[in-house]
Image (cartoon, helix red, strand yellow):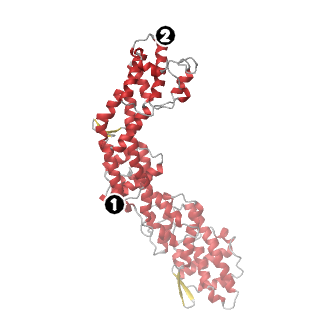
Amino acid sequence: MSSKKLFITSSLGSKVNWCKEMDCDEATARKVCGIAYEEELLRRTGAYVEHIEDDIGDVKDHYFNPFDPSIYNRLNYLYSERVPGELELENIQKLQQFFDLPPEDISVIHTKCFSYALSTHFCNVMKKSPREWLDKVESELVPLAQKLYIEERPLDMMLRKAEYDYLMVEANRLMMDRKPGKDFEERCDYIIEEFKRLKVFYSKNGNHRQKFSISSHNDNLLEEIMGAFIISHCDVYGYVDQRKLDEQCAVYGMCGDFRRKILNRLGRKFYHRFLRKFSEEELSMDSFKELEHLHRTYEFTDQDVADIYKTHVGIRIRDWYDPQAGLDSLKRLIPLIHDKNISYFIPFERSRRVQWLFNIVNDCINHGVDKADTRIYTYTVEDFMQLTYEGGEEDFESLQGIINTAIRALHMTPEEIEISRIVIAEELGGAALEKAMQMLQVKGGIYSADGEVSKFVRAMAVAPKGTIPSIKKNLPVIRNYELIRKVIMMLPCSDDALAKSIKMLNEVEQA
């Protein structure tokens, strides 16, 4: 008997003893009737069933066999293409009576079969009438679902999907056009209001709740969106509305540690860019006063801000530091580190600290002005003779102030200071002595060698006590000490400084 004939015979509405007809127990009969009903339902509502098409009552060809699990498994992958109209629904209800299916079985079958068609229908309604959505849900969509015996939870999921798809389209516009400004701020506000209007955002016991959020699946994209949101609010209002920030984060499912990670990373980038504005200015924690209203926005603690400053100063030092760094670099360093030392901001190896102090002393030895045929050095022999290396008052005017500044800023240990002093005496003193002896070999060289001899004396004055014998091993061999003494006696310095200079040369000679 064909399915068409079944619909026009009185037997369709009659009671059939399916257990007797199929010679099986009640559970098996109910399952088989459910499978047969599902196949006919799919056929009537546009599902692609040609590959299993067969009349319900015609089993002579043995192709359609409700007892065969493979048939049922194939039905699992088939869905109705359309929602049934009134006439189709009447015929479907007659089928339900014919198979004597209970409401719970019908509900399971309909929920599965109509999930695609209903979801598509809901999305179309939302697309055509987004402003009337809530009214449509109450007046049309829920009654339709109830008429079709759709289960409550799947129905709720289909409604949420329609809302999600609609809001996702709106959110995608933000993802595609992230230029900060009033327009961006207004679009963000519109999406937030849509979340509220559609009751995706709601309040329960005074607490924020939401049905779902929009996922970008890309942390970098989220950073850009939130960055544009924050900048837009600063441009439009001069500050970031914390409530709207919370809502914007909720739109994209940013909460807890994930939200903190995104905002922290975004804030660190922004703060570093902000500090770059002061590349030629003095940096301090006061630079952040302009950004205090953003600390909460980026979820920074006071320690976080201090760490950002510390990291930025370290980056700045690395940018311009090189092995030739000397006095000028020290002057550039102090406005960055203030009363701290360089090791507080970046790891700084001993060899670099020693080299930097060496370069500073070298700059001080050579610092001066040329007058006529001679050079007047800024820091005299007396200055070098009187140096101490225990720290103290800092400045960039006196030699002692410079050394004190360098020792503190470079975080020099007593051992490192001693190593530096020995290297200065050996290398700077040795180089100056070599040039002086070459000049002395020329006629009249005694009058031109005073500059190099002055450098030699000042470099040797830096040497720690008792180290002259070991330093001498690395100095050029002096063949005429008397000539060196004559030049020392011509140096423009006090009698006490001359006496100490001669004594130092004698130590070298006797070592």
Residue 311 location, x and y as percent? Answer: 47, 57
> Which part of the image, by quadrant, shows the C terminus?
bottom right
Residue 172 location, x and y as percent? Answer: 42, 49
Residue 503 location, x and y as percent? Answer: 61, 77
Give SS at disc 1. helix
User: How many badges with numbers are in the image?
Assistant: 2
Residue drawn at the location 56% of the way across and 64% of the way down: 353
Residue drawn at the location 58% of the way across and 65% of the way down: 354
The answer to which image quadrant residue 505 occupies is: bottom right
Residue drawn at the location 36% of the way across and 37% of the way down: 211
Q: CA distance from mark 1 to mark 2?
A: 78 Å
- Above-or-below relation of 409 to 447: above
Amino acid carrying label 1: it is Asp
Q: Residues within 10 Å of mark 2 (few under 14, many from 20)?
A: few
Amino acid carrying label 2: it is Glu
Q: Is residue 440 left or right of residue 459?
A: right
Residue drawn at the location 36% of the way across and 52% of the way down: 297
Disc 2 target residue:
21
| Nearer to the camera, 18 or 189 | 18
Res. 212 in view: no
The answer to which image quadrant residue 181 occupies is: bottom left
Label located before the other in sequence (1 or 2):
2
Disc 1 target residue:
235
Q: Is residue 335 left or right of residue 459?
A: left
| Nearer to the camera, 304 or 256 | 256
Q: Is residue 511 left or right of residue 354?
A: right
Give SS at disc 2. helix
